[in-house]
Image: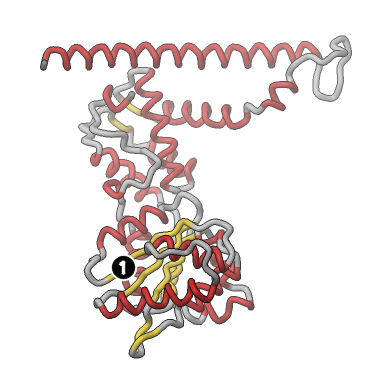
Amino acid sequence: MYDGFYNLSKKPFQLNADSDFFFNSVVHKRALAYMRYGLTQGEGFVVVTGKPGTGKTMLVKELVNSLNSDNITIGIMVSSQVGADDLLKIISATFGLSYEGEDKSTLLTRIERFFIQQATEGKRVLMIVDEAQNLPKDALEELRMLSNFEMSGKSLFQTFLIGQQQLGETLLLPEMEQLKQRIVATYQLKPLNEEETKSYILFRLEKASWQQMPQFDNNVFNRICSYSQGIPRRINTLCDRVLLFGYLDELTVIDLSAINKVIADIEDEASLTTDEFHDVLPGANATTTDADGSVEERIIALEKMVRDLQQTVTKERALLRKAILLQLDMDAVYNENL
């Protein structure tokens, strides 16, 4: 909705990992450098960890887009709680190998033959495991065993483990020592600082053909960084809501009060649980008071909640009205061009 109002070519703060919006911050640049260094080694494991929303999946897409498919065969797996045998089946499926009804030894033989075939064609095989913190230890051990496949002294298989911080903790366990010794590069993604947060927001706006409409007061970026803790996904969520708020209120300038209002709305929504709603309702013994407050206090709280809900409904109606008008305008333009 707001993209049309602000003449944007697309939504600048969408949550899906669109590589067109890859922001090469200092931390992401270093992470890519470590990953590319690991590739030059051609063996072992590369580990990248970070909090949820720090851009790990975007990193994977950026790396894959930059690789030459003529000399490397890439498989990408988003992991779940899979054991060692299921892992082999997932790897087989990823590289187009049959796996139904096969035992472990058959799967291993078929996978090794595939690795050898790729090597004879001048290719290396790279498996990128996203959300690798979900892999149990036996699955990680199976990946380590696959890294033993060699031909003419060269490794046939390399693995990148991309995951949340729990992955790093798992790899520090004593039983993971053999895998840890095969890690050739590791990097932990950090959140963006205040300056990078501002650059990140402006970068994404410009990628969406932003023409200074709406304008952003300079003092809003520190507030956005503070609230989001510099985590890109949280920045996207907040900024998307800010632009929607600006659209509803027809703002041409996003100032600190607008940011604070949106943050307050988000926090109110987070606190508005079913239990809290019931807490303010008068109970069966409405004539008595208890530690939670008097009947009058509960009624006042309930009235406030009703007012807040009414305001939300009013905004939703305004949004619907604008959507209908926008669609009518688009239909008119379309009909004129027929």
- Residue that appears at 27% across and 34% down: 10
Q: Residues within 10 Å of mark 1 (few under 14, many from 20)?
A: some
Q: Quadrant of the C terminus?
A: top left
Decide which of 314, 199 is in the foreground and name it: 314
Residue 53 pos. (x, y %): 46, 49
Residue that sits furthest to the front in the current view: 101
Answer whether residue 48 is visible to the viewer in this image: no
Residue 73, compared with residue 131, is above or below; it is: below
Q: Residue at x 29, y 23 (%)?
A: 252
Residue 59 or residue 298, whichever sits in front: 59
Q: In the rendered image, which quarter is residue 1 located in?
A: top left
Residue 186 can be seen in this image: yes
Seen at 42% across and 41% down, the residue is 235
Task: Compare residues 194 and 155 and report the one nearer the observer.
Answer: 155
Q: How many marks?
A: 1
Residue 188 image position (x, y, % from top left): 46, 64
Asked whether 45 or 97 is in front, the reply is 97
Q: Pointer 1: what residue?
A: 73
190 lies above or below 322: below
Q: Position of residue 212 (x, y in %)?
A: 23, 31
Q: Tell me where residue 37 sits by quadrant.
A: bottom left
Mark 1: amino acid: Thr
In the image: residue 320, left or right of residue 145 = left
Percent coordinates x, y for residue 207 in the rendering: 24, 41
Q: Is residue 338 left or right of residue 290?
A: left
Q: Secondary structure at mark 1?
A: strand
